[in-house]
Image: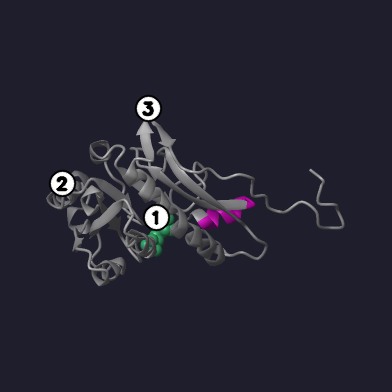
Amino acid sequence: MAELKRRAAVLISGRGSNLGALIAAARHPAYPAELALVLSNRADAAGLDRAREAGIPAEVVESRPFGRDRAGFEAALGARLEAAGIGLVVLAGFMRVLTEGFVAAWAGRMINIHPSLLPAFPGLDTHARALAAGVRLHGCTVHFVTPGVDEGPIIAQAAVPVLPGDDEAALAARVLAQEHRIFPAALAWAASGAARLEGGRVVLDAPMAGGALANPLPGGAGLPTEIP
Ligand code: GRF
């Protein structure tokens, strides 16, 4: 069945823990995507070693020498993707904003993970901003990539509670554990066609959650748990 797998490239800029989760999931024989290439825009990205240890071709296309020439950088990137026969692009902590042209070329075939419950907290420093805003629930999102940064149609989300005493690191770690759960699942759905972009929205053939997560929980302070 290997020939039916979608050839996916994972684009990274750093640590690569999400890449690690994808690599682990993709080892399953029934996983519908093959991680055929890892590309980093930084030569010092630790994720490159994870890829090489897993036997995945790992290449560097340095963005820095291109300066503001984003299209030039993307042309170099695109050439590698094409040479490797890639059908699906996975942004896993890839810290470059992509041009409209590149995004259009990969419409419906490029996904990203973002560490917040979009549309809340697009952009950087999401955990610090969630703490500053005082939200009780935070989380992560996997979405198809569209030209607006962190704006694309949502495939999957996971929510976590924000707890008293949380600092940025504690909250980031709680969210990251969920990133590692939903990202491999979302990639599998995108690769198999169970998640697809139709008319700007995601059509999803996947089991949906029942129930709801609330924080704080009802009850406490001597109150019955039934108080709505
Ligand atoms: C993750 O939190 C991801 O959501 C964000 O950047 C971080 C990358 O972490 N876009 P890693 O490189 O996957 O460990």
Residue 199 badge: 3
Task: Between residue 205 and residue 48, name the one nearer to us.
Answer: 205
Per the model, the C-alpha gap separating discs 1 and 2 is 27 Å
Instruction: From the image, give the main secondary structure of the stretch colored magenta.
Output: helix
Q: Amino acid at mark 1?
A: Pro
Residue at 12% x, 51% y: name it: 83
Residue 184 badge: 1
Q: Nearer the viewer, mark 2 or mark 3?
A: 3
- Residue 134: x %, y % from top left: 64, 52
* Residues tagged 1 and 2 counted as in contact (Cβ below 8 A): no
Q: Amino acid at mark 3?
A: Gly
> Where are the magenta residues, as a range?
127-136
Magenta segment includes 164: no
Q: Quadrant of ligand 1?
A: bottom left
Which part of the image, by quadrant, shows the C terminus?
Answer: top right
> Going from the N terminus, do you reach mark 1 or mark 2 first?
2
Q: Nearer the viewer, mark 1 or mark 2?
A: 1
Asked whether mark 2 lies closer than 8 Å to ligand 1, one says no
Q: Quadrant of residue 101?
A: top left
Helix or strand or loop: what does disc 2 sit on?
helix
Magenta segment includes 129: yes
Q: Is residue 112 visible?
A: no
